[in-house]
Image: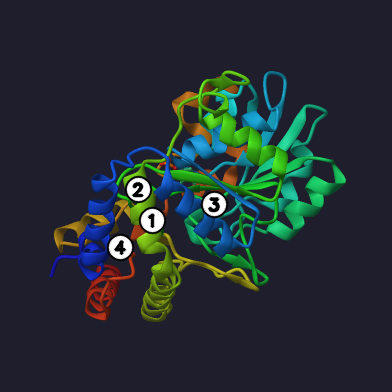
Amino acid sequence: MKVPFGDLRTQYQSIKSDIDNAIRSVIDETAFIRGKYVAEFEKAYAAMYGVKHCISCANGTDAIYITLKMLGIGPGDEVITVANSWISTSETITQTGARPVFVDIEPDYYTIDVSKIEEKITSRTKVVLPVHLYGQPAEIERIKEICKTYNLHLVEDCAQSHFAEYKGRRVGTFGIAGTFSFYPGKNLGAYGDAGAIITNDDDLAKMSTMYANHGALKKHLHEMEGINSRMDGLQAAILTVKLPHINEWNQKRYTNALLYSERLKDCKEIHIPGLRPNSTHIFHLYVIRTERREELQSYLNDYGIETAIHYPTSLPFLKAYAYLGHCPDDFPVAYRYQKEILSLPMYPELSEDMIDYVTTKIREFFK
Ligand SMILES: *Cc1c(COP(=O)(O)O)cnc(C)c1O
């Protein structure tokens, strides 16, 4: 049996005629950039989130950059974020001219360790930028309280957590803005790059829309300089077709995750993902930990099971951040876990047979 790490084809085949029709309409109408299909998706996404504004843009990285920039973040400022994430989270901070300040992760849920945020706050801190990593909400209520106490903006990186909930409320709606990626492999994925910001703040929405469109709300009326970060009509039309399915797909991922955990829970050598109480993990990734990660990964590979590592080097230890001069003791949990984490195949279309096969091979390896 072969178990690929991802499988975008099976999902496409399940909604092929709707997708093909949507693509044909966009081409027939030559509605290639922004326009009707993008407006329709923005409206539908905002409605599903119960927020006033959804501002589309070219990708999830730009969604973070545009938000920070339009909150006025720049040189001399500091943005607090988490040690384990994809580099978009921190490189966008740097792109505004501000400095990323990293915080270690919690041992059980792999998201930002709230108890270590306050010690990082200085007079230059302007934003806290948590990531709902792997699809699991961060401890967002307490983060929000800290932001309130210190008068900081809260921006949520939801690139891996579409429609995940914390105490019945969707992540992305706790702070001033939530940013999303629709990269093809994300839980809600386009067929190319795409991203969005959600917010209830009218000013931020207006400024972000403007900034993403060369600083103009109307053609040729540039109120400022901006950037070119627009969503394609094709991506928007595809996302609109996929949107009504997202809850069912997230639910299937969750069911698959429970199957994995059930079959692996007695295996002493590995740690299965912890579930934060009162929240829904949407399992963008199913991440286990073992001290024999490299051996296990190559064993599984020999049996046709593809795995991946998210991420092999935590942000502070990347060459890109060598200038910050961090050592392992600054982020002991992230440092230890980067050598132990392993992402197993995870998608809605994963079959029970595949999960049985993967978990059987894992158990065999440790025997
Ligand atoms: C994917 C991702 C992004 C960036 O999204 P792109 O659409 O690829 O630019 C940002 N943050 C996190 C945590 C991500 O996983």
Q: Which residue is mark 1?
A: 239
Left or right of residue 350, residue 310 in this image: right
Above or below, 358 against 177 in this view is: below
Say which amino acid is labelled 1: Leu
| Between marks 1 and 3 in the image, the one whose residue lies nearer the viewer | 1
- Residue 262 figure quarter: bottom left
- Kindly state the secondary structure of the residue where label 3 is placed: loop
Q: Earlier in the sequence, mark 1 or mark 4?
A: 1
Left or right of residue 154, residue 181 in this image: left
- Kindly state the secondary structure of the residue where label 2 is placed: helix
Q: CA distance from mark 1 to mark 2?
A: 6 Å
Q: CA distance from mark 1 to mark 4?
A: 23 Å
Please tell me how crowded label 2 is: few (under 14), some (14-19), or many (20+) other residues with Cα within 10 Å. many
Q: Which residue is mark 2?
A: 235
Residue beneath the point at 76% across and 32% down: 125
Q: Which residue is mark 4?
A: 345
Residue 273 in percent (x, y) is at 48, 66
